[in-house]
Image: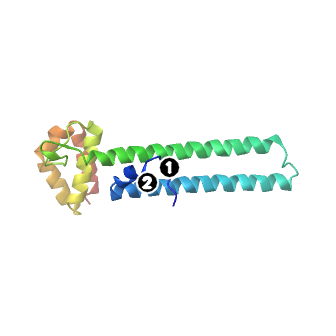
Amino acid sequence: MTIDIIDLSDPQYQDLSPVQLAMVRAAQAKKDSILAKAASEKKELLYILLQNDNARSSVRAQEEDRIAKQAETDVAVVREDLLYQLAYEALGTEGNENGPYRYPENPNYNLTYSQRFLVVRNYYMQVTQDSATRLEAYRADSLARSYLGEFYQTLYDLLASYVN
């Protein structure tokens, strides 16, 4: 698979974690799918216009431009989403004098509250599969109250919604 969704040098690709590399490959597959669909739509348009003896009309050029612009827009969305995911994934690899950032051992206070919400949510979703135990552990977590601020209740409600 040729990866051209983002431009990275070989050393930069080597520095990607397996999770990040999987994200890049998935985004590349989405991009390839979008471009293949656009090519298919253009081909179908040509066949329809040929059937109606309008293959040389300006409609073809206009529709092909529209399809190409839509494909470019969709690819840009996939690219931006990939860059955001890579940046978010990289947050976990940073750290301070206490070691790498990891909730609850060494929480990252440089994150926005919405990013903190995601970190704490991911932590509790990985702690246990039992939703009731997960909710009790979260309820007893005094660090989460101060770390999440107003998002504490939002995460509590989310975890409570998983309990049967």
Left-right relation of 23 to 132 = right
Q: Quadrant of the C terminus?
A: bottom left
Q: Residue at x 21, y 39 (%)?
A: 148
Asked if disc 1 and disc 2 are in contact, CB closer than 8 Å, the reply is yes
Q: Which of disc 2 and disc 1 is earlier in sequence?
A: 1
Q: What label does residue 5 carry, if any? A: 1
Q: What label does residue 23 carry, if any? A: none
**How many residues crowd around disc 1 within 10 Å: few (fewer than 14), some, or many (20 or more)?**
many
Q: Residue 110, image x and y in percent?
A: 23, 36
Left-right relation of 20 to 145 = right
- The answer to which of 155 and 77 lies nearer the viewer is 77
Q: Identify the image quadrant of residue 153.
A: top left
Amino acid type, callout 2: Val
Determine the CA span between mark 1 and mark 2.
8 Å
Q: Residue 1, image x and y in percent?
A: 51, 61
Q: Residue 61, image x and y in percent?
A: 76, 42
Say whether residue 11 is visible. yes
Residue located farthest toward the right when viewing the structure as drawn:
53
Say whether residue 154 is visible. no
The residue tagged with tag 1: helix, strand or loop? Answer: loop
**How many residues crowd around disc 2 within 10 Å: few (fewer than 14), some, or many (20 or more)?**
many
Q: Residue at x 34, y 59 (%)?
A: 18
Left-right relation of 4 to 149 = right
Q: Residue 42, image x and y in percent?
A: 71, 52
Q: Which residue is mark 2?
A: 24
